[in-house]
Image (tube, rainbow, N blue to C red):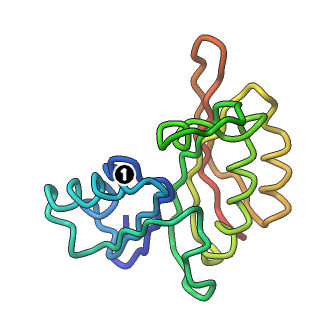
Amino acid sequence: MEGSEKVMEIGTGSGIILAYTLINGASYGVGIDVNPYACISTMLTLKANNVYDKADIILCDGLTCINKHEYFDVVIFNPPYTPGVEVHDYIDLALIGGPTGKEVLMQLLPYMANVLRNGGKAYIIVSEPPSAEKVHEMLRELGFKKTRSLSKKFFYETIHALELVKI
């Protein structure tokens, strides 16, 4: 991380990723989560790591709470990707990504493209099955170029960690 980077993490959960970016040189961070308990956990993680004063934590569903004229250098998103439609609690919100598992990611990709500055990097997780081709197609349409991809196969799925640059 460079000292002047502004970082946004969508779905902070415990806040450990946001804390890591701030500890390693990001100058400012925004953590967003729809779960109030995740926001509290993020706050505690940032305080425990002495980086609380470098971040804002926002209780919000998606990116609708971000000023469309605020830009970030890095956006990080590990979306819920389990297929399903019944959401009953915050655990379900963290796991269920829609009927095919990709809907939450597909819904938030345009927002990510709007808040990421040109040349900025996005880090996202994509799971297969189902096919990730629609996600890759949408990324190209939104002006993202894949610069690195790491994959790991687990039992019935393959997890892809993508590094993207907005061009």
Image quarter in which the N terminus is found: bottom left
Which residue is most to the bottom?
A: 69
The residue pinned by badge 1 equals: 38
Q: Residues within 10 Å of mark 1 (few under 14, many from 20)?
A: many
From the top left corner, tell me how far across and down residue 16 is, in percent.
Answer: 31, 49
**Who's the residue at 77% across and 36% down the image?**
99
**Who's the residue at 39% across and 48% down the image?**
13
Which residue is most to the top?
A: 155
- SS under mark 1: helix
Q: Is residue 161 above or below residue 73?
A: above
Position of 11 with respect to 104 (left or right) is left
From the top left corner, tell me how far across and down residue 106 is, in percent.
Answer: 75, 52
Q: Is residue 21 above or below residue 137?
A: below
Q: Is residue 9 above or below residue 53?
A: above
**Who's the residue at 79% across and 65% down the image?**
142
Q: How many marks?
A: 1
Q: Which one is nearer the viewer's eye here, 61 or 15?
A: 61
Kind of residue at disc 1: Ala
Position of 51 with respect to 40 (left or right) is left
Q: Is residue 88 above or below residue 135?
A: above
Which residue is most to the front?
A: 88
Q: Based on the displayed image, in which of its 4 quarters is residue 69 positioned?
A: bottom right
